Amino acid sequence: MIKIELGSAPRLQGQPVRRQSLWLLLRLWLAAKTEDGAGWVREAELRERFAATRNLRMVISRAYADFERWGVRVGWGKDRDRPLHMLPLAGRSRGPHWLARGEAERLQIFLRGNAVDAEAVAVWLGLPATAVVQNTTSGFGEADPAYWHAWAGARRDMLDGRLIVDGDHGALAGYRHAQALASDARWQALALLQQAMVWRRAGNADAARAVLDELDRHWHDVQAPEHAWLGAMAAIVRAWCAYAERDPQRAYQILRGAIDDPRWAPLFQHHPRVCCEHANLQALIHRAFALDAQRTQDERNRAADTALQHYRLALTLANEAELFDAAASTASNLGWSIWLFERCGFDVGAAGPHSPLSWIALAAWLSEHHGVGGGCWNSIYLLRMVRGGGPDIVHPDEAEFRRWPVLSPQQFRTRTAPIELTSRWPRWLDLATALQAEVDSGRLQVDALQRSNLLLEVAWYQAYEGDQASSAAAATRLRRRLRELVPADRVFFREALRRLPQLS
């Protein structure tokens, strides 16, 4: 047994101890005793606790050296079944940290000779005892009407694509207002999570991560285990940010770590929103793997098949939970992915008998019928698919370019019946320029990648309709925006512009 005496001069086995090391040991003990066996202490909590420390890694290294000298077995990382001596030192400072099985029972904690309970230890640690020990939401108040009014308005703005308008309008402003009205940490965390999602949809991964870091500082799942979905969703948003930066492997690793976290594992099986977001992002990640020319053909075929399976699961989950904005996005991505995989010559047996355009039509119908927007990806996919990508010739002759077969709006509606769409565009160019006007006016806010894709479609259809001057102007606007994109995307658009007729 290991005896710890608290007080102004804490001691372990009668010897003076380093206070920072003892703080971490007692925090680990408290986690093991009160947090449903999860026992995690995460890097974010240590960073907050030792904010004045210039080198957190050194604090952690000294603590582990002390643990070894004290004879206490402490591990790190997500794999708690791995022997301690086999844990990689390179990842120790990132945590999460935990006591090995049976170690918590070896610690005997006293204050002036009297044994103390978990609540007293929480007080010594400087933690809110009710949040750490009781594991209930009894300390949380109900959100008032003003909070939900701000929340609902922000949600409507988000669905309509009004992400960041100004300090008083748009989804970001609405969720910030809700945060200011929050009565306690639970409602504040909910508003912060939504702010991160707004930034992610706006294409600003750094801003999204900054909000998630703020969420980590103010919210720990142990405060209310039944609301641990906030932590799971925050992990998904972090993975989204990695995917948006064209790092699908990192996104996959973040999701893998989240799924393995014992606090969240059940949520990835049963929570509707977590399950749906997870399946949709897994589909995007595996689609990226399938399109990675550095992988073998067998790997790419398997990844393509996996992506389609995840999309079908995400679509089912979204409709069952009546998350129709997610359902529309997933149907759109399903159709686009099938079209891409077929063009790449993949064996996509999971694609099924339905044409890619039928999924695009379903996405458009869901958006119209349920009043959800929030972007123009589905229209971009539609515009590109009905033209079959266009001629794959460098600067084709204008007459030859205009003879390229394009599925007309009427033919599209015929092929996708019985899905009836209220938006009946006489020409695809009308759809492209209408969307461009919405974006230019600020009524529809999209990220840099969507904006660039939309400009490409405008330039392509203007050239197809014989309006070379307007097409050249759109192409010029697109070239000026390429600096906003990651290098791989710049290459794509430069090559796409070379497939237009020579523009003056």
Image (cartoon, grey):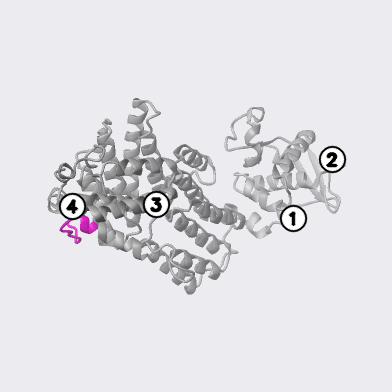
What secondary structure is marked by label 1? helix
**Disc 3 and disc 4: Cα gap in Å?**
23 Å
Determine whether the residue tagged by mark 4 lies in a helix, strand or loop. Answer: loop
Residue with the mark numbered 1: 120
Q: Residue 24: where, in percent of width, then height?
A: 72, 45
Kindly indicate whether the residue at mark 4 contacts the one at mark 3 (C-beta within 8 angstroms).
Answer: no
Q: Is residue 251 above or below residue 141?
A: above
How far is mark 3 from mark 2, CA to CA?
A: 68 Å
The residue labelled by disc 3 is 480
Along the viewing direction, whichever of 487 and 467 lies nearer the viewer:
467
Helix, strand or loop status at disc 2: loop
Structural crowding at the residue carrying mark 3, measured as other residues with C-alpha within 10 Å and reported as few (<14), some (14–19) or many (≥20) = few
Asked if residue 450 lies left or right of residue 54, the reply is left
User: Considering the numbered disc 3 on the image, is that residue within a helix, a strand or a loop?
Assistant: helix
1 or 3: tag closer to the N-terminus: 1
Q: CA distance from mark 2 to mark 1?
A: 20 Å
Q: Nearer the viewer, mark 3 or mark 2?
A: 3
Is residue 232 found left or right of 412 in the rendered image? right
Position of residue 490 measured from the top left corner of the image (x, y, whole percent): 39, 43
Query: Can see residue 406?
Result: yes
Query: Closer to the observer: label 2 or label 4?
Result: 4
The magenta region covers: 420-431
Disc 3 residue type? Arg
Label disc, if present, on residue 466 of the rendered structure: 4
The label number, if any, that marks residue 13 in the structure image:
2
Residue under the point 18% across and 52% down = 466
Residue at the limit of the structure toward the bottom, as seen here: 146
Q: Which of the marked residues, 4 or 1, is nearer the chain's N terminus?
A: 1
Q: Specify which label sits upstream in the sequence, 3 or 2.
A: 2
Mark 4: few, some, or many residues within 10 Å (few <14, many ≥20)?
some
